[in-house]
Amino acid sequence: QVRLVESGGGSVQRGEDLRLSCVASGHVPSMAWFRQAKGKEREGVAAVSLWLNTNYPAYSDSVTGRFTVYRDNAKNTLYLQMNSLQPEDTAMYYCAAASWSALRPSLAVSAYHFWGQGTQVTVSS
């Protein structure tokens, strides 16, 4: 069992930046960020998978160019740098982890079996 703890959420204005962090209790090859807005399904935002000592990222179309996912393997910590936030980015953000590795990490909810409790991000206009 891997425990995930997110932090870094908050309330910001349109165009501002935030960085989310997720600390895992142990090493997991693949980690990801998901988000769920009120009344909507949970969606994959960004993921990173460690494959042959290299971290390979993946992003959803909605955040490409604005968000950057990266990890500190030594600290078992995943980050999500979110720039130029928009009101449509408002959601609960969840960290997830999985024991598989891939060159193109999945952004599907079903691919991950460890989940954090979430951290709220609210962007006002």
Image (spheres, rainbow, N blue to C red):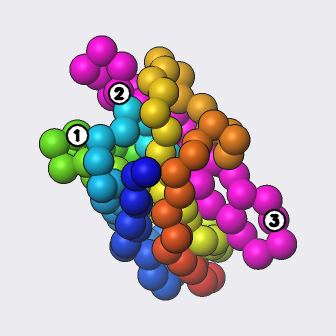
Q: Residue furthest front?
A: 1
> How many other residues sit within 10 Å of disc 1, few (<14), some (14-19) or many (≥20)?
some
The amino acid beneath tag 1 is: Asn
Q: CA distance from mark 2 to mark 3?
A: 30 Å
For the point 48% across and 27% down, the residue is 100
The amino acid beneath tag 2 is: Leu
Q: Position of residue 30 (x, y in %)?
A: 43, 36
Q: CA distance from mark 1 to mark 2?
A: 9 Å
Q: Is 122 inside the magenta-drawn segment?
A: no
Q: Residue furthest top?
A: 52
Q: Which residues are magenta?
A: 33-62
Q: Is residue 28 visible?
A: yes
74 and 122: which is toward the camera: 74
Quarter of the rendering containing residue 57? top left
Query: Which residue bears the numbered disc 3?
Result: 40
Question: Which of marks 3 and 1 precedes in the sequence?
Answer: 3
Q: Position of residue 66 (x, y in %)?
A: 49, 50
What kind of element bears circle 1? Answer: helix
Image vertical order of residue 66 relative to residue 50, above or below: below
* Relative horizontal placement of residue 11, taking residue 21 as reference (left or right): right
Query: Which residue bears the numbered disc 2?
Result: 50
Image vertical order of residue 35 relative to residue 118, above or below: above
> How many other residues sit within 10 Å of disc 2, few (<14), some (14-19) or many (≥20)?
many
* Relative horizontal placement of residue 125, taking residue 52 as reference (left or right): right
Query: Which residue bears the numbered disc 1?
Result: 73
Quarter of the rendering containing residue 6? bottom left
